[in-house]
Image (tube, grey):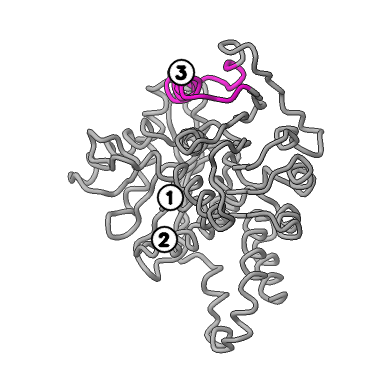
Amino acid sequence: MEKIISQIIQRDQHEKEFHQAVQEVLDTVKPVLDRNPEYRQQAVLQRITEPERVIMFRVPWMDDQGQVHVNRGFRVEMNSAIGPYKGGLRFHPSVTLSIIKFLAFEQVFKNSLTTLHMGGGKGGSDFNPKGRSDAEVMRFCQSFMAELYRHIGPNTDVPAGDIGVGAREIGYLFGMYKKLRNEFTGVLTGKSLAWGGSLIRPEATGYGVVYFAAEMLAHRNETLEGKVCLVSGSGNVAQFTTEKILDLGGSVITLSDSSGYILDEEGIDTEKLQFVMHLKNIRRGRIREYCEKYPNAVYTEVDPDLSYNPLWTHKADCAMPSATENEVNEKDAQNMIAAGVQLVSEGANMPSTPGAVDVFLESKIMYGPGKAANAGS
């Protein structure tokens, strides 16, 4: 194991997110390899940790003032052993090859757990859609697809949405794909119903996180009825996680974005959730605006110098980290336990650091890792 991870680190020295994802899997599967030495002989670990294909390309596009910008585009086709590559596209300034490789690696195991015939892949760009007009986002998406279309297809590679890529972006991407290939086909998931999308696709991940939590609780003869939940993020996954918690009788008191988080001790009810959905999906505003609408809520700005996130210090029964990778560190996990959290169901991909996971396991709370909890099934 140590030899394999050291080879990966030596080969790709700056890909720390990918190293972390691989280390977590290798630590977990060691007993399987000990019982099945033929897996080592066939170099199974080396094969699953090396992408089948990495595609990197430039994405030139023009803003509304006529200025040309150039971003990087990525698609990592990690593994197609059981089916076409399947995984989202992320548009965010933090996107690097390491981020995309880690997400693609995670996706392989998530998809296999669904028992559907899907391989794993992931893609995206360091383009930031925040603050950009619809026309600018459209021009970027068209330029991005002008290269990506060569590498995807309904039986080859089927991208979806992720952070920064919602129904609007998927619509622009699909329109360009359709134009370039002269065919109307199911090459992208997450499309609107008018473009052949699935009825419950937007809800699937968030609902799945809550259903997974409900199943864990059922093993202790408990339900979500009356449970107080901490949810991070305010995008698609966080929104529908909140919606399903409300459906099952629980309450949600936090939501967040990259700037900070809101605490509403009265609970984020259906009306308030509809406001959040309109704020984030239509107006594309910031979560702090929630407190302007509901002044009894409190907004706390992110302090980058703080060693923990105060969102996870509030008294609650359950936590659903649904924002981004490594948002819960060891200190955050300790704060959760001290605040009474007895269940963690991960909505984001690898939201907990290895130290945080160790705290959850040592505390013997109910823990649903993202590979299972957010697979959307």
Name which of mark 2 and mark 3 comes first in the sequence.
Answer: 2
- Mark nearer the N terminus (3 vs 1): 3
| Residue hosting label 2 | 114
Labels 1 and 2: the sequence-earlier one: 2
Which residue is located at x 63 percent, y 42 percent?
Answer: 319
Q: Amino acid at mark 3?
A: Arg
User: In the image, what residue occupies the spot 78% across and 38% down?
Assistant: 308
For disc 1, the neighbor class at 10 Å (few under 14, some 14 to 19, many from 20) is many
- Marks 1 and 2 in Cβ contact (< 8 Å): yes
Q: CA distance from mark 1 to mark 2?
A: 8 Å
Q: Residues within 10 Å of mark 3 (few under 14, many from 20)?
A: few
Q: Which mark's residue is nearer the viewer, 2 or 3?
A: 2
Q: Relative to 102, say whether 304 is above or below.
A: above
Q: Is residue 217 visible?
A: yes
Tag 1 residue: 376
| Image-based side of 372 in relation to 15, left or right | left
Say if residue 256 shows up in the picture: no
